[in-house]
Amino acid sequence: MINRQLKFAEAIHEAIDICLDRDRSTYLMGLGVPDPIGVFGTTKGLQEKHGKKRVFDMPVAENAMTGVALGSCLVGMRPIMTHMRLEFAMTAMDQICNQAAKWHYMFGGQSKVPLTIRMLIGRGWGQGPQHSQSLHAWFAHIPGLKVVMPSTPYDAKGLLIASIEDDNPVVFFEHRWLHNIHGPVPEGHYTVPLGEPRIVTEGGDVTIVAASYATLEAIKAGRELEREGIKAEIIDLRTLVPRNDAAILASVRKTGRLVVVDQGTLTGGFAGEIVARVTEEAFGALKAAPIRVALPDIPTPTTRALSNYYYPPPAISSRPCTGRSG
Amino acid sequence: MPQESRLALYRSMLKIRRVEERIQALYPEGDMRCPTHFSIGQEAVAAGVCKNLRLEDHVISAHRSHAHYIGKGGNLRAMFAELYGKVDGCASGKGGSMHLIDLSVNFLGCVPIVGSTIPIGVGAAFGAMLQDRAAITVIFFGDAATETGVFHESVNFAAVHRLPVLFVCENNLYSVNTPLDVRQPGNRTIAELARGHGIETSQHDGQLVETVDAAVVDALAHIRNEGGPALLEFITYRWLEHCGPLGDLHLGYRTQAEFDSWATRCPLRLYRKVLEDNGLIDDAAHAAMDTKVAEEIDDAVAFARASPFPERSELSRHMFA
């Protein structure tokens, strides 16, 4: 039993702090990293503690700076990059997808790229079309990248330490609406292995798969279903790549029903990938067609009058499966 | 310059030329199945730059990289094996001509996305600085790379942190088949453009290997003594098609007269004349040097051909470290 409660953002901060303490080759950079706000508290005070050489701000040049981080890996460094919004990292897709993802493979395994790139996903307060996209499916589509998206403070710390200590490029997603949630977090160093989903609640009627903030929505949906007498088994993916699907397949073989809740848009999204895997591997176990609950294929509107329709409330997340299983 | 240094400069150019001529001869056999970019005509830059580097200095390059790899001392057997797609290739056959690497001489790699290796080279220099190492990083790129945003982002960062980077721009006047004058304004040079970032820059004749050498000596002294990056622009000329072993004058994007004027300024021919005029080499000595280079190439080609292709198990190997 862990008594200590931390916010998700504090857990991120602690993970970075521990990694900077343990390994001199680790450094942290990103826009606003050393400023008084410290990327929503996740980097606050780290420059004062670890020095300007290891924790620093950078020019607004995300593409080059990703290349700089990668280049430093080639001589033995272990950088952490931070993007306050995922969209800023989109200017660095060449360095992330053409270079970092492929460097180890295309040079026959001679160099390694232990680069962790934090990307924050916004939501609410009119974040609008360019501050709120969850493009995890894009990165999962690129061989050579690991894709991590925790939903709890415990996992945030353990997965971030595991990501930083991993010898490969890792894209680490932090949903802004998770930063202020509390949860138990042990002190000191620990890791959560990349690739193992977490069973959040056990149930025999329907399997609900989600990741990152969508996991919280899945949990709320599960509570609504429970009031109707339906027991959902909720699985938090934690990492998209690598990923062990055994728990998902076992669950669907038990429940016969699958809903995937995805905080990204529907078409070409990651929910489709999970549905496809389950359909390929456990088709015979399905009692009903799997369901994807995702954002509509529309840019995020800024006005709350429209964003209220854009984001599915938990009731909508649960409605399709009540419909099918009724 | 000492006699031996002058001969070494020439030998380096000759080796680069002969290696590429051999690839040119073998390429039509269809066994080297990868896009291959030749730098015949541009050898003086690679030779003049690399002569002044130490083993611990890093080099990184782009798609037209054979000369830089050979100049830095990259393993020739591994290079040929890579072009043949063999398991003993410098990248286990997974890279090809556009992805040469030899970490034993700190040739960090090369990739064919124009401009893309510039920040990576800056990062290698940054990493070395964080580690308090004295290594200098040389980044080779072409004229078109200076049109990318990432070039300017990278030079800016190198300038802010006064990183030990030598940016080497081989301006061969064409990007694929597109001339410089439709891509960049004629009223400034690349060296002048880069100077706007607050770093030392200069433009030089890239056909004269001793001119290249002298410019590099000055630039490296500046980097080592005063700190901060420098950029050298060398005007040179590509003889062959953008990609592949053939000529391309029939395409009509450049004239025979233009080509001829550059062919008479072949860096090897120009320097051989200098060496002959100074009594440093005669026909017999040149033939002996040529024979030695040919033997090394023969050995590398034989090694590459004898090397096996990667097994099926290699396909998924090296996915993750």
Image (cartoon, coloured by chain):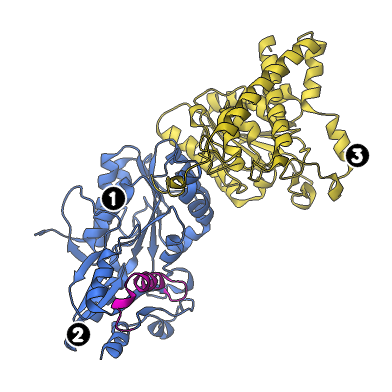
Q: Is residue B96 above or below residue A308?
A: above
Nearer the observer: mark 2 or 3; the answer is 2
Residue at 42 percent of width and 72 percent of height: A127
Regarding residue A182, the answer to whether it shows in the image is yes
* Discs 1 and 2 carry the same chain letter: yes
Nearest the viewer among B61 and B309 is: B309
The part of the chain drawn in magenta is: A265-288
- Tag 3 residue: B257
Q: Residues within 10 Å of mark 3 (few under 14, many from 20)?
A: few
Residues tagged 1 and 2 counted as in contact (Cβ below 8 A): no
Which secondary structure class fits the magenta region best? helix
Residue at 70 percent of width and 39 percent of height: B27
Residue that extends furthest to the right in the rendered view of this protein: B257
The amino acid pointed to by label 1 is Ala
**Kind of element beneath mark 1:** helix
Q: Position of residue A248 (x, y in %)?
A: 27, 69
Subunit bearing disc 1: A
Regarding residue B160, the answer to whether it shows in the image is no
Q: Is residue A12 above or below residue A125?
A: above
- Tag 2 residue: A230
Residues tagged 2 and 3 counted as in contact (Cβ below 8 A): no
- Tag 1 residue: A162
Nearest the viewer among A27 and B51 is: B51
